[in-house]
Amino acid sequence: MALPAERNPLDPISESQPVDRGQASSGGIAATVKRAQDAVAELSADYQNWALADLAKAEQALAEARGDPATAQPALQRLYGVAHDMKGQGGSFGFPLVTHVAQSLCRLLVSPGGSSRHVELPAEEATFGLIEVHLKALRLILEKSVRGEGGDVGQKLVAKLQSMAGRS
């Protein structure tokens, strides 16, 4: 056994330092993981409510874009932000189908070769109609509590939305 003076100074563990073997006073790694899982479960219980609130913001942004096509781009940028958040959260809270539909919507809102920082779409009814179909699909998934991938129907829905958006 090396004496303290002979230890490599770059070695962060000294014999006087305790080594965490998952049994620290707060319960260690296992307890930390359990607390994180409990927190996610608690948030999951509320996910549908805040996802529906976010969806209402996206629907409002679409209404604004439709109401004045000359100023549609800022509203569509807000809508993209909501869709992007939903894309990131859906799978984390047991709704991967939300993630897939929101991802399709994000792709629709960003033109090929474009940037998510600058949504620029033709402000026309056909584009708005495609956005609306995506939003209705998200509302249906959330209101009917469709967890998981949605089976064969869910996969067909996502494929159809991606095809309609020209992003299959």
Image (cartoon, grey):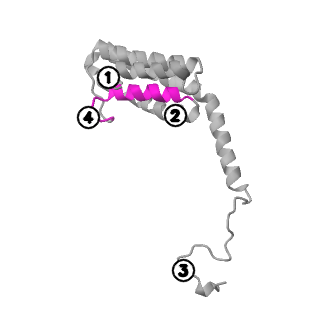
Q: Residues within 10 Å of mark 4 (few under 14, many from 20)?
A: few
> Secondary structure beneath disc 1?
loop
User: Residue 17 location in percent, x, y?
Assistant: 67, 72
Contact flag, marks 1 and 2 (Cβ < 8 Å): no
| Type of amino acid at the residue the image marks with label 4 | Gly
| Label ID, residue 95 | none
Report which residue position mark 1 lands on. 166
Q: Residue at x 36, y 20 (%)?
A: 163
Q: Residue at x 53, y 33 (%)?
A: 91
Report which residue position mark 3 lands on. 9
Q: Which residues are magenta?
A: 95-116
| Type of amino acid at the residue the image marks with label 2 | Gln
Residue in the foreground of this view, choosing between 85 and 53: 85
Residue 55's place in the image compared with 91, above or below, is: above
Q: CA distance from mark 4 to mark 3?
A: 51 Å
Whichever of labels 1 and 4 marks the residue nearer the N terminus, that label is 4
| Type of amino acid at the residue the image marks with label 3 | Pro
Contact flag, marks 2 and 3 (Cβ < 8 Å): no
Residue 88 shown in magenta: no
Whichever of labels 1 and 2 marks the residue nearer the N terminus, that label is 2
> Secondary structure beneath disc 2?
helix
Q: Residue at x 27, y 31 (%)?
A: 112
Report which residue position mark 4 lands on. 113
> Secondary structure beneath disc 4?
loop
Whichever of labels 4 and 3 marks the residue nearer the N terminus, that label is 3
Q: CA distance from mark 1 to mark 2?
A: 24 Å
* Dominant secondary structure (helix, strand or loop) of the stretch shown in magenta: helix
Report which residue position mark 2 lands on. 89
Residue in the foreground of this view, choosing between 155 and 136: 155
Q: CA distance from mark 2 to mark 4?
A: 25 Å
In the drawing, does residue 92 fall left or right of residue 64?
Answer: right
